[in-house]
Image: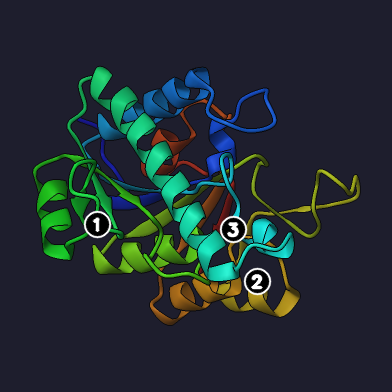
Amino acid sequence: MDTIKYKRLLLKLSGEALIGDGSYGISQEMVVYAAQEIKLAYETGAQLAVVIGGGNIFRGVEASVKGIDRATADYMGMLATVINALALQNSLEKTGIPTRVQSAIEMRELAEPYIRRKAMRHLEKNRVVIFAAGTGNPYFTTDTAAALRAMEIDADIIFKATKVDGVYTKDPVKNSDAEMIEKITHADVLKQGISVMDSTAITLCMDNNLPIIVFNMKNKGAIKRALLGEKVGSFVGG
């Protein structure tokens, strides 16, 4: 078994990562790809938890701008994360990885309710735990849910999977002169207004000394390489 740098990690996977070439919805090809990447990391012996977004199906903030009450829109977004979680669970279990979905909003027929000690027990039994429905509260993003769950399960680090190679001075998609930052502190992320995770999530990580690695999900084997201590993407921390 490989020597791993981080024993327990939380992977933050955006809903957009499951879109594929379309503009919305779930691409089965991308779900299978994500499952294969998680499997490579799982086989190192690390304990893995996942927080998944729902932006590929429904984005609460955008919907609230268009007239839906913000709290209602956020609850709709939470339901979208449950759909994504079930899709990922299905693909993971087809690869032979035992998986549990825990939802912050109770829906017993679909998922376990979120119970911290039970989640940690699943991890100790080498099951991948997928946390769905964000924090269960409106006005909080799935980034904040990732930071919160990571601290609750005593994760060593957060891996944030994105569509770019790491943290940049500007949006690299819109700005050709954007420069990648290989290492930065939580405080500098907040001070410079750099888009890594929302400010609530970054502040939670900073206050609890929880590092973050930001990387491109499309780089095959990135999660496994980072687990083994290789330099991947950008490092946010002290």
Classify 10 Å Cα crowding around label 1: few (below 14), some (14-19), many (20 and above): some
Mark 2 — residue?
A: 189
Classify 10 Å Cα crowding around label 2: few (below 14), some (14-19), many (20 and above): many
The residue shown at (44%, 29%) is 34
The amino acid type, in three-letter code, at marker 2 is Val
Q: In the rendered image, is residue 7 in sight? A: no
User: How many numbered callouts?
Assistant: 3
Secondary structure, mark 1, is loop
Instruction: Tell us which disc is closer to us: 1 or 2.
Output: 1
Secondary structure, mark 2, is helix
Question: Which quadrant of the figure has residue 169?
Answer: bottom right
- Which of pointers 1 and 3 lies earlier in the amino acid sequence? 3
Q: Which mark is residue 60?
A: 3
Badges 1 and 2: C-beta atoms under 8 Å apart? no
The residue shown at (56%, 40%) is 57
| 90 or 9: nearer the viewer | 90
Q: Position of residue 105 (x, y in %)?
A: 30, 59
The amino acid type, in three-letter code, at marker 1 is Glu
Q: Position of residue 76 (x, y in %)?
A: 49, 54
| 195 or 25: nearer the viewer | 25
Q: Which mark is residue 64?
A: none
Q: Which mark is residue 106?
A: 1
Q: In the rendered image, is residue 153 in sight? A: yes
The residue shown at (51%, 46%) is 54
- Which of pointers 2 and 3 lies earlier in the amino acid sequence? 3
Question: Taking 123 as reference, is 72 left or right?
Answer: right
| 93 or 110: nearer the viewer | 110
Classify 10 Å Cα crowding around label 3: few (below 14), some (14-19), many (20 and above): many
Secondary structure, mark 3, is helix
Q: Is residue 73 above or below residue 26?
A: below
The amino acid type, in three-letter code, at marker 3 is Gly
Question: Which quadrant of the figure has residue 198?
Answer: bottom right
